[in-house]
């Protein structure tokens, strides 16, 4: 891989470190995590869950690392803020970010992105669940450190039936 291509890709991904999570800002959290912070813990959760369930953990890790990458271009948008064409905008952003990579990597990451978006494989469902689990865990942590923030809406996240016990345990902590 050409060094410039790698640096361009990493520069795009690095933008996630500077993008605060919009839902936390809207809820009044004073010092919200960045999208990169969220993506890191989502990836760790996805790895542990995937390994414990015997799924394709390499695919899960790749998917978890890519799941919010388009936000480097679109910004972090809450579900309530998304317009009808948001999926198209994210697809365009992902294509733009991936375009600097060699074709084989670009195609592999694009296919991984599409699989995540489709939410039809056990691995993609698991990454969506890990994304929600991380969000609820973060809400619980903010509730302890930032009690004035309005966080109740985050506790209603939907996950697959096999993950509901994890969400219940998080809620019990408060």
Image (cartoon, rainbow, N blue to C red):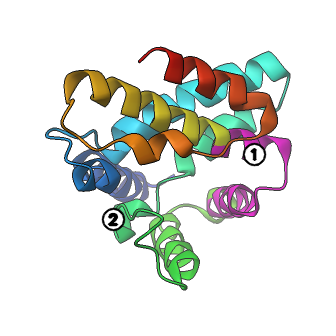
Quick one: SS at disc 2?
Answer: loop
- Choose between 159 and 18: the one closer to the eye: 159
Quick one: SS at disc 1?
Answer: helix
- Based on the picture, tell me whether residue 168 belongs to the magenta stretch: no
Is 108 located above or below residue 134 in the figure?
Answer: below
Displayed quadrant of residue 140: top left
Residue at position x 51%, y 24% in the image: 171
Residue at position x 46%, y 74% in the image: 82
* Number of marks in picture: 2
Residue 139 placement (x, y as % from top left): 38, 34
Displayed quadrant of residue 12: bottom left
Is 144 located above or below residue 33 in the figure?
Answer: above
Q: Quadrant of the C terminus?
A: top left
Pointer 1: what residue? 125
Residue at position x 84%, y 42% in the image: 122
Is 84 located above or below residue 168 in the figure?
Answer: below
Using a 10 Å C-alpha cutoff, classify the residue at mark 1 as few (fewer than 14 neighbours), some (14 to 19) or many (20 or more). Answer: some
Residue 141 placement (x, y as % from top left): 34, 24
| Left or right, 10 with reference to 155 | left
Contact (Cβ within 8 Å) of mark 1 with mark 2: no
| Left or right, 70 with reference to 37 | right
Residue 19 placement (x, y as % from top left): 26, 53
**Residue at mark 1 to residue at mark 2: CA–CA distance:** 23 Å
Residue 137 placement (x, y as % from top left): 46, 28
Pointer 2: what residue? 75
Which span is picked out in magenta? Answer: 106-128
Q: Which mark is residue 80?
A: none
Residue 61 can be seen in this image: yes
Residue at position x 70%, y 56% in the image: 108
């Amino acid at each position: 891989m050409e060094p410039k291509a790698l640096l361009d890709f990493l520069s795009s991904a690095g933008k996630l470190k500077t993008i605060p999570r919009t839902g936390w800002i809207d809820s009044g959290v004073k010092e919200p995590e960045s999208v990169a912070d969220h993506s890191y813990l989502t990836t760790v959760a996805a790895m542990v869950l995937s390994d414990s369930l015997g799924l394709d953990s390499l695919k899960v890790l790749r998917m978890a690392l890519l799941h919010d990458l388009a936000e480097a271009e679109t910004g972090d948008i809450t579900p309530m803020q998304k317009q009808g064409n948001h999926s198209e905008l994210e697809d365009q952003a992902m294509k733009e970010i991936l375009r600097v990579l060699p074709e084989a990597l670009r195609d592999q990451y694009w296919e991984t992105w599409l699989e995540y978006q489709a939410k039809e494989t056990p691995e993609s469902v698991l990454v969506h669940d890990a994304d929600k689990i991380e969000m609820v865990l973060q809400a619980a942590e903010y509730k302890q450190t930032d009690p004035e923030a309005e966080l109740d809406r985050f506790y209603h996240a939907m996950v697959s039936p096999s993950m509901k016990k994890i969400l219940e345990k998080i809620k019990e902590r408060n």
